[in-house]
Image: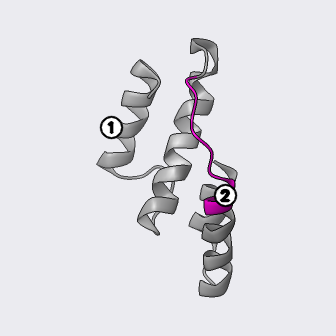
Amino acid sequence: FALGDCFAHLSDAVERDRVQAAAARLQTPRDRLPRSLRPLTILGGLGARVLRRGEGPLFGDRGSALLATRLGIWGR
């Protein structure tokens, strides 16, 4: 989540590349979290979506709302 949020707020292309590279190095397989930690699953999923797309805010379009709903309900 933190790297995705940072990436969404950067305007310098070099810094954005560095954040994407750091996220690629730190990427680990996602385990399902307990139901009580679903908000973290949602934030992580939205951050990963921004990094995959390479643009946009964490939440602000129909796709991000659908992703948040899906992660909140099923946790994956």
The answer to whether 23 is drawn above or below residue 1 in the figure is below
Residue type for callout 2 = Leu
Q: Position of residue 2 (x, y in %)?
A: 69, 52
User: Relative to 28, does residue 22 appear above or below in the rendering?
Assistant: below
The residue under label 1 is 66
Residue 41 sits in quarter = top right
Name the magenta segment's main secondary structure. Answer: loop
Q: Secondary structure under badge 1?
A: helix
Is residue 68 in the magenta section? no
**Residue 5 lies in quadrant:** bottom right
**In the image, which disc is placed on residue 3?**
2
Q: In which quadrant of the rendered view does residue 17 lie? A: bottom right
In the image, residue 10 lies at what x, y percent? 63, 74
- Classify 10 Å Cα crowding around label 2: few (below 14), some (14-19), many (20 and above): some
Earlier residue among tags 2 and 1: 2
Q: Is residue 29 magenta?
A: yes
